[in-house]
């Protein structure tokens, strides 16, 4: 059985779990999210995108 989840959903669940169980303050999570939006508009965006896609490919290839 295959389950398909967008990466943003997985990261959202991890962020909510970190806020609830690790005691990370909400404002810290907001700052990190805003930093992500900032990085999306820099020259690093293609490298981050490629690395994320390659990581997802590796995880998917090891589980098939």
Image (tube, rainbow, N blue to C red):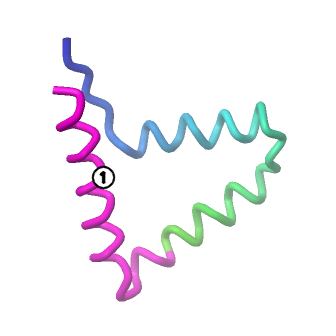
Q: Residue 17 location in percent, x, y?
A: 66, 33
Q: Nearer the viewer, residue 26 or 49?
A: 49
Residue ID at (23%, 28%): 63
Of residues 38 and 50, the one drawn nearer to the viewer in this rendering:
50
Q: Quadrant of the N terminus?
A: top left
Query: Under tag 1, what secondary structure?
Result: helix
Pointer 1 residue: 55
Q: Nearer the viewer, residue 58 or 40?
A: 58
Residue 18 location, quadrant: top right
Residue 19: % across, % down: 74, 40
Crowding around mark 1 (Cα neighbors within 10 Å: few <14, some 14 to 19, many 20+) is few
The residue positioned 58% from the left and 72% from the top of the image is 35
Residue at the far bottom: name it: 43
Does 14 appear above or below 57?
above
Q: Position of residue 30 (x, y in %)?
A: 67, 59
* Stretch of the chain drawn in magenta: 38-64
- Across and down, in percent, residue 22 comes to 79, 38
User: In this figure, what is the number of numbered marks?
Assistant: 1
Does residue 9 appear left or right of residue 15 in this picture? left
Instruction: Name, please, the residue furthest toward the top.
Output: 1
- Describe residue 41's horizontal placement relative to residue 4 as left or right: right
State the predominant SS element of the stretch in magenta: helix
Please identify the quadrant where the C terminus is shown.
top left
Residue 14 located left or right of residue 59: right
Q: Residue furthest front?
A: 62
Is 57 included in the stretch rendered in magenta?
yes
Which residue is at 57% across, 38% downward?
A: 14
């Amino acid at each position: 059985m295959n389950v398909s989840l967008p990466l943003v959903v997985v990261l959202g669940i991890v962020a909510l779990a970190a806020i609830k169980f690790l005691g990370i303050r909400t404002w810290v999570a907001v700052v990190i999210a805003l930093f992500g939006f900032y990085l999306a508009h820099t020259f690093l965006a293609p490298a981050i995108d490629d690395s994320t896609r390659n990581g997802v490919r590796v995880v998917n290839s090891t589980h098939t």
